[in-house]
Image: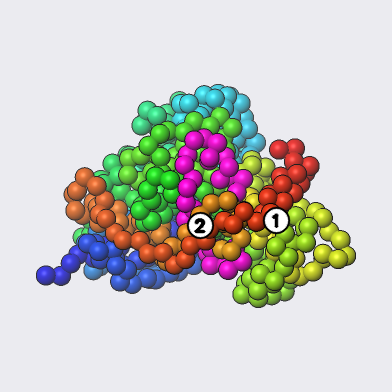
Amino acid sequence: MTRPVVAGIDSSTQSTKVLHVDAETGEILSKTSAPHPDGTSIDPEFWWQALQSQDRLENVAAVSVSAQQHGMVALDSSGQPVHEALLWNDTRSSAQARRLKEALGPEAWAREIGIVPVPSFTVTKLAWLAENHPELADRVHQVLLPHDWLTWRLAGRPEEATTDRSDASGTGYYSVPEGRYRKDILELAFGRSPLLPRVLDPNGTAGETGAGALLAAGCGDNAGAALGLGLTAGEVVVSIGTSGTVFAPSAARIQDPSGAVAGFADATGNNLPLLATINAARTLAASAGLLNVDLDEFDELASAGAPDAGGLTFIPYLDGERTPDLPHATGTMTGLTRANLTAENLARASVLGLLCTLSDALDRLRAQGVACERIMLIGGGSMSRSVRRAAAEIFNAEVVIPAPAEYVALGAARQAAWALSGAAEPPTWSRSTEETHEPTGASWAAEVRGRFTASRIAAYGL
């Protein structure tokens, strides 16, 4: 008897990836990918074209979409976008984020919603649209997120769109503690409450595709990665992709008035406290460009540099930053001398600056009482040998490199298999490890962290 095949879709900032997976074993049967245009805003139709260009999803039993969180897809009454979708990394709504934060106070936001406004979140983007383009805001009939929009398209544009708790928890107008939309928050930000998608259970269904495949609820990308990795208590993901993310499963709900730790929901019914950085793998790419080398050559340079980069300290806030909340920050390099100004040390400083930024995020997660016993290092940046070798020292924790896989898409596929089975729990799939690194307590790591903290405080006062 032929076992059922499910499809998991990952619509990220940079591309759409599709996995076909054996629903019973989790074996990946095929993988395809298509790029998206670069930028912080986009016509959502590009997501649909990227998906349609590679996979019609005609030979699968179930499908699930996991996608970048927070993106604002504001549609008129005919289902057309009134404005390009503003993505998570679009910081134009920083002024609106500050005003919304002040309107309720950070303690109330953390207690009642689970997150404190920063420019990434959907609610601040809607406030920006209302303030800067009121004529477009007046046309908004329905607001979706990227995964909601793709699921809606796959379902044939039904009258009622759907979402899930993990993605809704990143909007700023969904209360994680109460499990419901807070339309009063939406009215505060946008002036009124447009139509919002129905929130499905983690193993719920959103209908069928045109080819007759079951459509699962879908989820946000980080919740998808957690599901794909099969995270357990004490394991923390550090993902180095377009963005950097640090997150862990938690039965307890996190309330962080500082706004650093977002109290998101996961795709299983629990919580997924998370921190995100705007600057991640592209920091390495930009540094490689500066040195006029490709990424492999850059990695060799970074591996050849002094362990502490010869005293160089790089604060890599090249595109502003979210953790800490510095949307208008720029990058900073300190400690330059004629002796240490080498290509090798510059490359090494870039790697260490990236890891120190992520380590700052880990420290904030630990401060909330979340166990961080084992770090699962994933994302494109984790392929770097210099990153892998330095991570355990900078993080001061065991670092596990899972076997390379598209874990967001794999998590979506696991959710599709879960919906298909009708079971109370997602299927158990095995996880393979490529390598593990243990910290040695090297003195240079503590020195690097100390210099990074001092430079950050000197530049930004926090």
Quadrant of the snapshot with the C terminus: top right
Quadrant of the snapshot with the N terminus: bottom left
Q: Which residue type does callout 1 highlight? A: Trp
Label 2 or label 1, whichever comes before in sequence order:
2
Q: Nearer the viewer, residue 429 or 32?
A: 429
Decide whether residue 408 is among the magenta residues: no
- For disc 2, the neighbor class at 10 Å (few under 14, some 14 to 19, many from 20) is many
Q: In this view, does 77 lie to the left or right of 396?
A: left
From which residue to which does the magenta span run?
359-387
Report x, y in % for residue 390.
61, 60
Image height check: is 78 above or below 60? above
Does the rendering let one see residue 185?
no
Which numbered mark, 2 or 1, is in the foreground of this view? 1
Q: Nearer the viewer, residue 359 or 55?
A: 359
Q: Is residue 59 left or right of residue 321?
A: left
- Would you name the residue on which mark 2 appears? 399
Report x, y in % for residue 14.
51, 62
Image height check: is 174 above or below 272? above
Q: What kind of element bears circle 1?
A: helix
Q: In this view, does 277 lie to the left or right of 410?
A: right
Asked if disc 2 and disc 1 are in contact, CB closer than 8 Å, the reply is: no
Q: In this view, does 17 lie to the left or right of 337?
A: left
Question: Which numbered disc covers residue 444?
Answer: 1
Q: Which residue type does callout 2 highlight? A: Val
Name which residue lies at 51% across and 28% down: 109
Q: Which of 409 and 373 is in front in this view?
A: 373
Query: Disc 2 to disc 1, how far (Cα)?
Result: 18 Å
Image label count: 2
Report x, y in % for residue 226.
40, 51
Image height check: is 311 above or below 167? below
Decide whether residue 375 is among the magenta residues: yes
Name which residue lies at 82% across and 55% down: 335
